[in-house]
Image (cartoon, grey):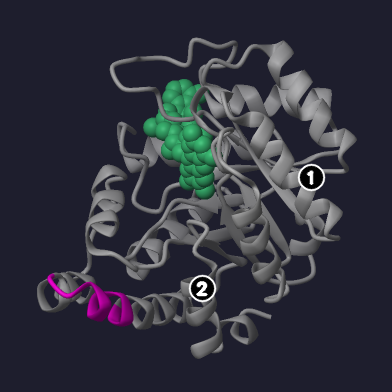
Amino acid sequence: MRISDMLRHKKTFSFEVFAPKPDKPMEPLLLTLSELYGFSPDFISCTYGAGGTNRGRTLEVCAAVKTAGQEAMSHFTCVDAARADVLDYIGQCVDCGIENVLALRGDFPAGREGTRGDFDHADELLSFLGAAFPQLCISVAGYPEKHIAAESAETDIAYLRAKQDRGAAFVLTQLCYDVDAYRRYAERIRKAGVTLPVVVGVMPVLHKDPTFRMAVSNGCSIPAELAALFGKYGDIPADFKKAGKEYTARLMERFIRAGIDGLHIYTMNKHEDVGDIIQNFGIRNAIT
Ligand code: FAD
């Protein structure tokens, strides 16, 4: 089913996973997926590795999700992607019954500028995909605190508007720990004429260093409440994780109250920790 059709009737609840490297077994992820299905997600997305070197695995994961009777969304990036690669990979997705694709530019490998593919930006990929596969639901990325390399929030939002004009079906956001920043973003994009549903991505706070690195590398602010966790529990991993889960649940509740169209959890394949957050704080029922 197309996610855009779900979003017409309800708020969605979903997960992101990443595929194992080609030399690693699939079984741990298959176990993770089967645990995640227990939370009745509306869809599960799988990331796409830089340059598409591991894309066979992304397809395998999405196909496994479909085979389990669940909805899948494959990410796809422009880095090193020629038109023929797009037709080949997305054609295989379609053959597996996958109806949802997240069209992204991708991050450039270290020391490199440009995609070195046939598309410089996600909007070009989106147009190409829309023309080649009109049956697909194609979503795009949005950045509540602006993309780290964007000239300004205004230009970033103008490009988002351009993606809407080129046929994007919904926006899936970058991690954001500041719900007020998200509210301001939601107001600004609506003023700019972006009417698409916005599904908010939440990165659970489980470990000090990765949380800090992810926020900083994406230009996301660290609100005082989160900074306090670093100060108070930063040297005690078990306590940090416990407080981080409570913080993540509060964050999700605040996003839901802010009027989002869907909640997408970046699971980092950690189904036990994610399961604790959902179960202990009643998150699944809060989003229906
Ligand atoms: P674009 O929309 O192309 O934007 C990139 C920059 O260029 C922005 O600064 C924007 O303001 C500007 N811009 C946009 N359009 C134009 C234009 N037409 N002309 C000039 N400038 C323009 N990366 C992966 O490698 N694999 C993944 O699976 C993956 N999943 C992600 C999932 C989500 C929900 C998000 C938010 C990001 C994900 N990323 C992933 C990271 C993403 O690839 C990077 O953030 C990347 O730097 C930008 O991708 P984009 O699609 O937003 O690019």
Q: Position of residue 242 (x, y in %)?
A: 32, 81
Please report the bounds of the magenta region as a residue range.
Answer: 235-243
Mark 2: give few (<14), some (14-19) or many (20+) Cα within 10 Å.
few
Q: Is residue 62 left or right of residue 157?
A: right
Q: Is residue 2 above or below residue 20?
A: below
List the residue tagged with mark 2: 272
Whether residue 158 is visible here, answered yes or no, is no
Depth check, front residue: 228 or 167: 228
Locate residue 101: give its quadrant: top right
Q: Is residue 85 left or right of residue 174?
A: right
Depth check, front residue: 194 or 97: 97
Residue found at x 69% / y 80% = 288
Callout 1: CB less than 8 Å from ligand 1: no
Q: Is residue 207 above or below residue 112?
A: below
Depth check, front residue: 108 or 149: 108
- In three-dimensional space, the C-alpha distance between marks 2 and 1, rounded to whole angstroms, equals 23 Å
Q: Is residue 237 left or right of residue 71?
A: left
Locate residue 247: give its quadrant: bottom left
Q: Amino acid at mark 2?
A: Glu
Q: Is residue 226 above or below residue 26?
A: below
List the residue tagged with mark 1: 63
Q: Amino acid at mark 1?
A: Ala
Name the secondary structure under disc 2.
helix
Depth check, front residue: 125 or 157: 125
Label drawn at residue 274: none
Q: Position of residue 32 (x, y in %)?
A: 61, 63
Name the secondary structure under disc 1.
helix
Q: Main secondary structure of the magenta part?
A: helix
Of the residues under marks 2 and 1, which one precedes in the sequence?
Answer: 1
Residue found at x 59% / y 33% = 22
Q: Position of residue 151 (x, y in %)?
A: 30, 31
The answer to whether residue 279 is magenta is: no
